[in-house]
Image (spheres, rainbow, N blue to C red):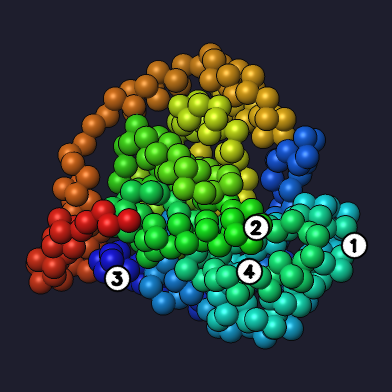
Amino acid sequence: MGMFLRTVMKKLRQGMFDPPKTFIWPPTVYYLPRNYRGQPYNLPLIELETRGCSWNIENGGCTMCNYGGQGRDLPSEILVAQASFALSIVRGSPYIHLVPIGSFYDEREVPEDARRKITELVRDSGFVEYMGTESRAGFVTEEKITKTVDILGNIQFEVGVGLESSDDIIRELIINKGENKASFLRFYRICREKGVVSATHVLLKPPFLTESEAIDDAVKSIRWSIDNGSDYVILMVMNLRKGYTLTNWLYERGKYKLPMLWSLIKALLDLGEEYSKKVVIGGLISSETMAISAKNCEKCTDRILSLLSMYQYTWDPDYLEEAWEYPCDCKERWKELMEMRDVDLPDRILRYYEEIALELFGRDWWNENKGWIEREVYEFERVG
């Protein structure tokens, strides 16, 4: 368990809810390029404003995430009203994702009565055929899933969870996820037994990793997810959110760079068709809280993004190949990034920890706490 990162994240989150930086009305709706039943489709993603992710509120949250919310409980009536309003916005869309800021199955964030009424709204909409939502894996139980499935009836249901990385050290000591792989294996089993589609979020380029390490970790994590039961994977390309995240804090100090789009394409190609056909791309389009997204250079970024969108719309691998073969000088710079090496990951994590601690807490704090922080890093086991 990453106690140092939790301490850091709580420090960085100070002021996040005073006042809240996001708003209840109107509920956020944006659209993702997808392919639904063999046809190009703009998938509406509805974000319900809630109290916020409990992991964030209680433990500082994940290092790249700004899922803040209001920081206080919201009445169920407000949550249901948001869902009702959002459904009127996306009226006629057969495939929707309706997600809270954190976890649909966290009772503190979405109380059971609100969850039931929201699910009933979807069922009674008359146009939804497929509903997706998101949760931390630990909140998903057979009982909760059964209740949702029973309400939805013939509507296909999907739940997405954030693995981020199958590497325990990366997931806990870099991302501060707070969930082991056993939680995800249990989640896959529940979904399989209940006929629910399981989706897994994998992150491309967490902090502290080199470009080549980031690609390798994403590929390994995608394969692990699918091999262990995930129906598909959402490859989340790292982006920067407005304030209150460690990635943004590092970026502002020149200690983090977003992945280049070449790395995204390389990861998809390295997977091979057996796996890549079960991967969709996330993180390039998002809500208004996204400040900067991954890119190449000014000459090729727009063209590469358009080809990636066409790939998402059509699943035609020729678009991916065309993007990879697109001639641009910045690919040489990317190749140089791919050649960069660093010290072993535990040593590197400790180096970053020291730099972070010195600025946030000071030299005296670091000297007093260095011992247990070193033990946390060097004695951490990849336990699954």
Q: What label sits on residue 37 in the rendered view?
A: none
What residue type is disc 1 on?
Answer: Gly
Q: What label sits on residue 7 in the rendered view?
A: 3
Q: x, y percentage for residue 141?
A: 55, 71
Of the two numbered discs 1 and 4 in the rendering, the one whose residue sits closer to the viewer: 4
Residue hosting label 2: 196
Answer yes or no: do the residues labelled 4 and 2 have beta carbons within 8 Å? yes
Q: Looking at this view, is 372 or 183 the one in front?
A: 183
Of the two numbered discs 3 and 2 in the rendering, the one whose residue sits closer to the viewer: 2
User: What residue is drawn where x is 59% and y is 38%?
Assistant: 278
- Does label 1 or label 4 sit earlier along the sequence? 1
Of the two numbered discs 1 and 3 in the rendering, the one whose residue sits closer to the viewer: 1
Residue 201 in the figure: left or right of residue 384: right
Q: Residues within 10 Å of mark 2 (few under 14, many from 20)?
A: many
Residue hosting label 4: 145
Residue hosting label 1: 126
User: What residue is drawn where x is 77% and y is 35%?
Assistant: 38
Answer yes or no: do the residues labelled 3 and 2 have beta carbons within 8 Å? no
Q: Secondary structure at mark 3?
A: helix
- Does label 4 or label 2 sit earlier along the sequence? 4
- Does label 1 or label 3 sit earlier along the sequence? 3
Q: Residues within 10 Å of mark 1 (few under 14, many from 20)?
A: few
Classify 27 as above or below 238.
below
